[in-house]
Amino acid sequence: MKKTTLAATLSTLITLSSGAQALELIVVKNYQEAATPEIWNRARTDQVPAGLLGRVDIASPQASYASIFPKTFLQESMFAVCHKSCADGDIFRINSGVINERDLSRWDVVEQSNVYYWINRYFSFLDEKLNYRPDQFLRILTNRDLKDETRGKALKNNAFFNPEDVSLSFLPATNNLLARLSGGKISRSGFDPSVVAHEASHYLFHHLFPNSVNDEIGGLNEGFADYIANIFLGNAKIGLVMLHGTALRDSNAQVDRQGKLKTYEPKMPVHDLGERAAYALWKTRELVSDTAEFDRLVIDAVVDLGRNPYSSVHDFKQKMLDRLDGIVRPESTSIARQFWELVFPGTPNRISSLAFLNKPQNTRPIVGFRTRQALPATLAQEYGTAAVTESSFQVLQEEAIGPGQTAILMGTENGQVGPHWVAIDMTRSNILGIYNGRKELVTNAAELEVVKPLADQAKGVTALINDFKTKVQSFSQLATGRGEFSVAYKVTDASSTAEPVTFNGRSVPGARIKLSLKRKLLAGLILGLPEIESIELLTMSSDKLPNLPLLDGKRVIGYKISFKTGTVSEVALSNAGVD
């Protein structure tokens, strides 16, 4: 069968623009109709049915060909939408401010046009409906090439906001033979107005609450992004275009896609928690007399929440309950309160006691680790992160402070960050507070940025220790041709070099054992495991570390993984409460 082109499917839409000063674009115009199953009957993978597309005339971009990026036509004063990279030129030809008709109907141009059109409407929506004007320039990349740093494969079927460089990325859709044979059909994320609005709402949330400490706020961020997209489009469903008529998430549904009731559970993945938040907001909105005022109160609640960097999702619940009176219809107030209690049972946790601040401090660390991760420079630039990140943290002390609560005294090996107490709600995995050496709660944004990595290590130290033990055990078995890793990888060469090791502050004799690896074919095709170039194991002589494996008569106290993509990850035990 002859492949259908976009130009052919849009033959009924081909008309000349009537406004000389207007810019004509082809965009996904009819999101509401995307839920109609019949419209997708003949839809191809990574395409959009003509029935959802339409031509729009909009004012020409305010800042086209501005100096911020080279040759960026779809640019406004606060954002630019570029194909793959704003460092490259346009992918379409322009004559007298009009996109060439042939280029206008290319799928790459449709995606870029669609994102530009809906982002433009979104910024107007923020200003006119929510009385909010962001002040950070937003860089937006469509059909972006981005690789998984461990697997070396192009990332697909996603979109994300990066707060580090204030950018939105819309990734390509899966369009390989295996996906087609399995019946999976998906369109690229930039074709979907709900995905565009969702990602733009992460940008908004970052403005409202830029210095959050707890992972639960990441879940709230997801729910907030869904909710704002819901009210922007007047539709409770997210992802209808991207998933060919199937909703990725539905804020009106009582159960999630796994069939679970939308009620809070501790330590939920962020998207699951986000579904609960969006559901609570959407259903509460049905009970209010003035929806526009309610939407502004949601913004106000997030701003208020952001004044406490240690806020949790239950703090947001309380902020919303505080705002129900006067906005929810009087006969529905009790229903709304009961509903929030059902979705988010419980109250915000507070520190039970600060007595730990006055405890005599240990002089010897309980445990300490050095970590290092290095990304190729180009990959780090794409992700908007540092090429090299390092840490050398120590657990100095641990105190129980109440039911389900503990305080951990953390410091760095080199003393660059002095000891800080981190109070943790272990049940919900929330940080309740970080206290410096003066026994003061850290709230300053600059200081939080420095100590938050320590706090995150404190919260996850048990998981890190368990993960470390599992990896050194598996890698040690691989060196002798045993264990699960030997099923997926073959050691092609092994070498050992004497190397001194710094442990408990002293230099002791040690060795570095390097294993060159080759990934077995089935491991790559079926399991999708990454290509690992080598694993290096750091060992030292010790009879005081019985929980760590032996290799060549020495204890394995560290590892270094080098991926073929150029990414390197290292973890080594640097301290332990033994001589």
Image (cartoon, rainbow, N blue to C red):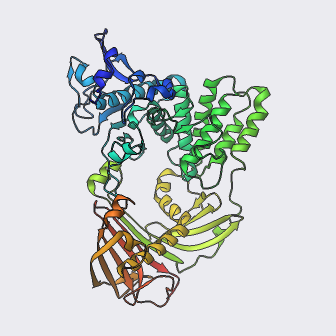
Residue 61 visible in the shown view: no
335 sits left or right of 2 in the view = right
- Residue at 36% across / 78% down in the picture? 537
Q: Identify the image quadrant of residue 137.
A: top left
Q: Residue 573 location in percent, x, y?
A: 44, 77
- Residue at 54% across / 33% down in the picture? 237
- Residue at 58% across / 74% down in the picture? 397
209 sits left or right of 563 in the view = right
User: Which image quarter is the N terminus in?
Assistant: top left
Residue 253 visible in the shown view: yes
- Residue at 47% across / 29% down in the picture? 133
Taking depth in this image into account, of 440 and 166 the one nearest to the observer is 166
Q: Residue 365 location in percent, x, y?
A: 52, 78
Q: Residue 520 location in percent, x, y?
A: 32, 67
Taking depth in this image into account, of 552 and 424 the one nearest to the observer is 552
Please determine whether, in this image, residue 125 is positioned above or below residue 309: above
